[in-house]
Amino acid sequence: MARCISPARLAQTAADTPWFKDLYDLFAPVREEAQEHSAEEIDRAVASARTTRPARQPADRQSSTAYKP
Protein backbone atom coordinates (compact mmCIF):
# COMPACT_ATOMS: atom_id res chain seq x y z
CA MET A 1 0.00 0.00 0.00
CA ALA A 2 1.46 3.35 -1.02
CA ARG A 3 1.65 6.13 1.53
CA CYS A 4 0.78 9.65 0.52
CA ILE A 5 1.39 13.05 1.98
CA SER A 6 -1.79 14.92 2.73
CA PRO A 7 -2.31 18.37 4.18
CA ALA A 8 -3.33 18.70 7.78
CA ARG A 9 -6.79 20.06 8.36
CA LEU A 10 -6.60 23.57 9.75
CA ALA A 11 -9.53 24.41 12.00
CA GLN A 12 -10.63 27.99 12.07
CA THR A 13 -11.28 28.50 15.76
CA ALA A 14 -9.89 30.80 18.40
CA ALA A 15 -8.02 27.79 19.84
CA ASP A 16 -5.72 27.58 16.78
CA THR A 17 -2.13 28.46 17.45
CA PRO A 18 -0.56 30.95 15.03
CA TRP A 19 2.87 29.28 15.22
CA PHE A 20 1.42 26.00 13.90
CA LYS A 21 -0.12 27.70 10.88
CA ASP A 22 3.16 29.55 10.27
CA LEU A 23 5.05 26.25 10.45
CA TYR A 24 2.54 24.56 8.14
CA ASP A 25 2.87 27.42 5.63
CA LEU A 26 6.65 27.32 5.87
CA PHE A 27 6.67 23.69 4.74
CA ALA A 28 4.27 24.25 1.80
CA PRO A 29 7.12 24.19 -0.78
CA VAL A 30 8.42 20.93 0.72
CA ARG A 31 4.99 19.32 0.46
CA GLU A 32 4.64 20.49 -3.16
CA GLU A 33 8.06 19.14 -4.12
CA ALA A 34 7.43 15.84 -2.34
CA GLN A 35 4.34 15.28 -4.50
CA GLU A 36 6.68 14.95 -7.50
CA HIS A 37 8.25 11.81 -5.98
CA SER A 38 6.88 8.40 -5.17
CA ALA A 39 6.70 7.15 -1.60
CA GLU A 40 9.39 4.59 -2.45
CA GLU A 41 11.76 7.34 -3.67
CA ILE A 42 11.20 9.33 -0.48
CA ASP A 43 11.72 6.22 1.69
CA ARG A 44 15.01 5.45 -0.10
CA ALA A 45 16.22 9.04 0.29
CA VAL A 46 15.40 9.08 4.01
CA ALA A 47 17.07 5.69 4.55
CA SER A 48 20.16 6.88 2.69
CA ALA A 49 20.37 10.09 4.73
CA ARG A 50 20.06 8.14 7.97
CA THR A 51 22.90 5.77 7.06
CA THR A 52 25.31 8.45 5.84
CA ARG A 53 24.89 11.02 8.62
CA PRO A 54 25.54 10.43 12.30
CA ALA A 55 22.53 10.88 14.54
CA ARG A 56 22.39 14.30 16.17
CA GLN A 57 22.45 14.48 19.92
CA PRO A 58 20.29 16.99 21.81
CA ALA A 59 22.17 20.18 22.63
CA ASP A 60 22.21 19.46 26.36
CA ARG A 61 23.88 16.09 25.71
CA GLN A 62 26.51 17.64 23.45
CA SER A 63 27.59 20.10 26.10
CA SER A 64 27.79 17.47 28.85
CA THR A 65 30.02 15.20 26.78
CA ALA A 66 32.28 17.94 25.43
CA TYR A 67 35.98 17.67 26.16
CA LYS A 68 36.95 19.61 29.26
CA PRO A 69 40.70 20.02 29.95
Image (cartoon, rainbow, N blue to C red):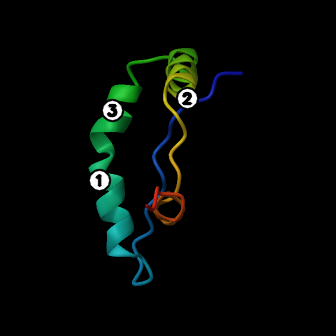
Residue 42: % across, % down: 51, 22
Mark 1 and mark 2: span between their CA atoms? 26 Å
Regarding mark 1 in the picture, which secondary structure is present there?
A: helix
Residue 7: % across, % down: 45, 46
Q: Is residue 54 above or below residue 47?
A: below
Q: In this view, does 58 lie above or below 48?
A: below
Mark before the other along the chain sequence, 3 or 2: 3
Regarding mark 3 in the picture, which secondary structure is present there?
A: helix
Q: Residue drawn at (62%, 28%), measured in percent from left and top?
A: 3
Residue kind at label 2, given as amino acid type? Arg
| Screen quadrant of the N terminus | top right
Q: Residue drawn at (46%, 63%), measured in percent from left and top?
A: 63
| Residue bearing mark 2 | 50
- Residue 32 numbered mark, or none: 3
- Residue 25 numbered mark, or none: 1
Mark 3 and mark 1: span between their CA atoms? 11 Å
